[in-house]
Image (cartoon, helix red, strand yellow):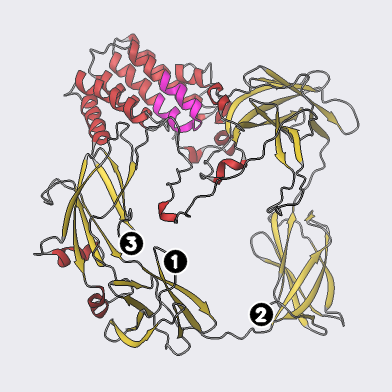
């Protein structure tokens, strides 16, 4: 029950960072009362398991004592989500196992637990280190429960695995097959041709390409039309890597590719994957224009229109459960053809195109189209005199009724319109309603009394013609003091001790002389915008790097001492900086709490420069001025010297198609990780 976080209070769930992790890991969080609900459940868990560990140790039951340590580690690792906290937990466990007698079988269970914790890391070599830890436990006590668990971990890390996807339609000689793999040296592939037009006649759904359940029927008893193997690069980090493969055939048409770990493609002790795709240079581009579709046939290699392409339009016959041919036509000199979809009788259609050996089809069903006439509709705008009210106060409101067409181009107010305005509380229960008639300008006004005894929160004012407005009903209490955070006495620097001070003062001017405060500092990286021109933005979240508590002094002052730490190895990465946020909560002797926060940005450099409102295009042969803004990292102007260069971009002799461009790395890519050629 203590570990069930659903039973924790919101404060206990949100303030895990403020606990002394070292004390919890040691199993000695101090003298606590287990029946005190104010004591954090994690502190109780650590105290109970620490006492259990010492009891077992005193009786000479060293393996049972180790299990108490492992359970404490499991509970703390689940509760502390920050990476730096989890790193401390892993290091603690590694140190305890190093000091433990490896000759005892339960040592292997500790190694299994350590391997699981390491395996959850995001570092590039996490699986390598997890495997090494599990190997040590497996080899030391192979028959013990911990040894068997270690063996399972090693097997899962070393297990081969892959997935395969393909382009829906691609041209010959392209990297049409994408293989995501780990621990696989060679992948065997076979391919069979299938007749796409024949499948249209027998298809019972809009999807024409065969699914996995159709593969056995398509390839049963038929020799493969193509067979080959792909040598995959090694994956010594035991993680997934991507390799693109080029099919070795160039015959146009539909293909089903079957991949296998085993060369004989047997189903036993094997992993089979199948993917269909169409090999063709023909591409169909569809565009909706009113009640018709404009279809353009183009060459995938050049993008030029294809004239004379033969088009066959099929409709899904619900009665027979298959597609039937309804029309044939050809593309014009511009590669275009028009389809009138106004009389298609509510059934999906499919378009198949052929030009020589090339063929293509619409990737999604074409549906009937109809002209929609914008309809006039009525609505209302509601206004209130305030956004927050207290029970017992009067809510003054005003409503303006209007009519407009569906396109939103014509609006008129509604004079003499009868409408009803209703007030509902946070439970959705009606408090009061009033029927009104708008004046000559379409407006009406009234008021409601906010009653006592109703649920506080978000209330809603609605009109029978449409439209609504939200208000807040709260027992608002006027604050008696405020908290402010001042500027640092000296400029802050990365990896240098810092002190930020603030003060709490009553609004009548005197300091808050009695009270306590809690503070924490979070950090998140700030990447320059130009990083994302060539790779996605990394997913980051703020992490707590420091926290503490204290008591305000006689002058109402608070002090927060911490070190804005950062990885010095990243100093060579241009433009990288960090955003730190200090949050302080001060509670006075009467229990009132007020908060303040301050954000500051630090980096390995103190200034940055950027183009101020850069133009998108410049006219050749004309003088142009570019304004460069020099600021500190918080955006304040920073006078000083600088230099600039203007470089000409070298254009390629021939523009590259998207398929020929380098693969964009993922947003989570680590430059220290192992990379395959792909």
Does residue 38 appear in this view? no
Q: Distance of mark 1 from mark 2, alpha carbons? A: 38 Å
Task: Count neighbours of disc 2 (C-alpha within 10 A) and say few if under 14, some if 14 to 19, many if 20 or more.
Answer: few
Mark 3, secondary structure of its residue:
loop
Residue on which disc 2 sits: 406
Whether residue 633 is situated above or below residue 288 in the rendered picture: above
Residue on which disc 3 sits: 171
Mark 2, secondary structure of its residue:
loop
Furthest residue toward left: 221
Between discs 1 and 2, the one toward the N terminus: 1
Between discs 3 and 1, the one toward the N terminus: 3
Q: Are marks 3 and 1 in contact (CB under 8 Å)?
A: no
Whether residue 430 is situated above or below residue 490 in the rendered picture: below
Horizontally, is 121 left or right of 510 in the view? left
**What main secondary structure does the magenta stretch of the protein show?**
helix
Residue drawn at 32 percent across, 27 percent down: 128
Residue 117 appears in which quarter of the rendering? top left
Residue 339 appears in which quarter of the rendering? bottom left
Mark 1, secondary structure of its residue:
loop
* Front residue of 257 and 321: 257
Q: Are marks 1 and 2 in contact (CB under 8 Å)?
A: no
Residue on which disc 1 sits: 303
Residue drawn at 70 percent across, 63 percent down: 460
> Is 82 part of what is drawn in magenta?
yes
Residue 49 image position (x, y, % from top left): 41, 21
Of the 4 image quadrants, the one containing the C terminus is: top left
């Amino acid at each position: 029950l203590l570990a069930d976080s659903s039973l924790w209070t919101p404060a206990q769930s949100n303030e895990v960072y403020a606990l002394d992790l070292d004390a919890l890991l040691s199993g000695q969080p101090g003298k606590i009362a287990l029946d005190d609900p104010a004591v954090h459940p994690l502190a109780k868990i650590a105290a109970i398991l620490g006492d259990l560990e010492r009891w077992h140790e005193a009786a000479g039951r060293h393996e049972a004592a180790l299990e108490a340590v492992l359970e404490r580690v499991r509970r703390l690792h689940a509760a502390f989500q920050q990476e730096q906290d989890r790193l401390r937990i892993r290091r603690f466990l590694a140190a305890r196992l190093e000091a433990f007698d490896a000759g005892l079988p339960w040592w292997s269970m500790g190694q299994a637990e350590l391997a699981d914790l390491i395996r959850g890391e995001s570092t590039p070599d996490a699986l390598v280190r997890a495997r090494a830890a599990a190997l040590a436990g497996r080899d030391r006590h192979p028959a013990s429960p911990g040894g068997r668990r270690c063996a399972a971990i090693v097997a899962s890390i070393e297990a081969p695995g892959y997935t395969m996807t393909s382009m829906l339609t691609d041209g010959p000689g392209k990297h049409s097959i994408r293989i995501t793999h780990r621990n696989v040296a060679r992948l065997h592939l076979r391919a069979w041709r299938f007749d796409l037009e024949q499948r249209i006649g027998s298809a019972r759904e809009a999807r024409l390409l065969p699914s996995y359940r159709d593969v056995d029927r398509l390839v049963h008893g038929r020799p493969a039309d193509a067979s080959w193997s792909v040598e995959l690069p090694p994956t010594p980090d035991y993680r997934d890597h991507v390799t693109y493969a080029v099919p070795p055939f160039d015959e146009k048409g539909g293909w089903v590719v079957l991949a296998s770990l085993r060369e004989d493609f047997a189903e036993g002790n094997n992993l089979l994957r199948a993917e269909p795709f169409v090999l063709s240079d023909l591409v169909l581009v569809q565009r909706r224009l009113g009640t018709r579709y404009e279809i353009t046939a183009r060459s995938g290699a050049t993008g030029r229109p294809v004239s004379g392409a033969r088009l066959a339009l099929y409709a899904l016959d619900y009665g027979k459960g298959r597609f039937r041919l309804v029309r044939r036509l050809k593309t014009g000199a511009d590669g275009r053809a028009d389809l009138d979809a106004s009389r298609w009788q509510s059934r999906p259609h499919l378009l198949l195109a052929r030009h020589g050996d090339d063929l293509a089809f619409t990737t999604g069903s074409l549906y009937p189209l109809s002209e929609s006439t914008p309809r006039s509709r009525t609505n209302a705008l509601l206004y209130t005199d305030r956004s927050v009210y207290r029970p017992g106060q009067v809510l003054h409101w005003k409503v303006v009724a209007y009519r407009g067409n569906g396109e939103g181009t014509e609006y008129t107010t509604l004079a003499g319109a009868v409408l009803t305005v209703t007030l509902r509380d946070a439970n959705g229960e009606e408090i009061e309603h009033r029927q009104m008639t708008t004046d000559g300008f379409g407006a009406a006004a009234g008021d409601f009394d906010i009653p006592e005894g109703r649920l506080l929160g978000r209330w809603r004012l609605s009109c029978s013609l449409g439209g609504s407005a939200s208000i807040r009903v709260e027992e608002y209490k006027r604050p008696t003091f405020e908290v402010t955070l001042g500027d640092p006495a000296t400029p802050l620097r990365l990896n240098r001790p810092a002190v930020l001070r603030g003060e709490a003062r009553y609004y009548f001017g005197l300091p808050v002389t009695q009270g306590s405060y809690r503070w924490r500092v979070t950090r998140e990286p700030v990447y320059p915008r130009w990083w994302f021109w060539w790779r996605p933005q990394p997913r980051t979240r703020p992490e707590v790097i420091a926290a503490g508590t204290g008591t305000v002094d006689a002058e109402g002052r608070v002090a927060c001492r911490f070190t804005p730490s950062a990885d010095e190895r990243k100093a060579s990465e241009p433009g990288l900086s960090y955003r730190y946020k200090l949050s302080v909560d001060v509670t006075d002797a009467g229990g009132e709490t007020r908060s303040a926060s301050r954000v500051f940005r630090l980096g390995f450099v103190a200034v940055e420069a950027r183009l101020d409102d850069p133009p998108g295009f410049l006219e050749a042969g004309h003088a142009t001025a570019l304004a460069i803004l020099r600021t500190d990292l918080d955006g304040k102007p920073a006078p000083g010297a600088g230099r600039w260069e203007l470089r000409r971009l070298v254009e390629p002799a021939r523009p590259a198609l998207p398929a020929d461009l380098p693969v964009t790395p993922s947003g989570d890519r680590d430059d220290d990780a192992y990379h395959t050629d792909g």
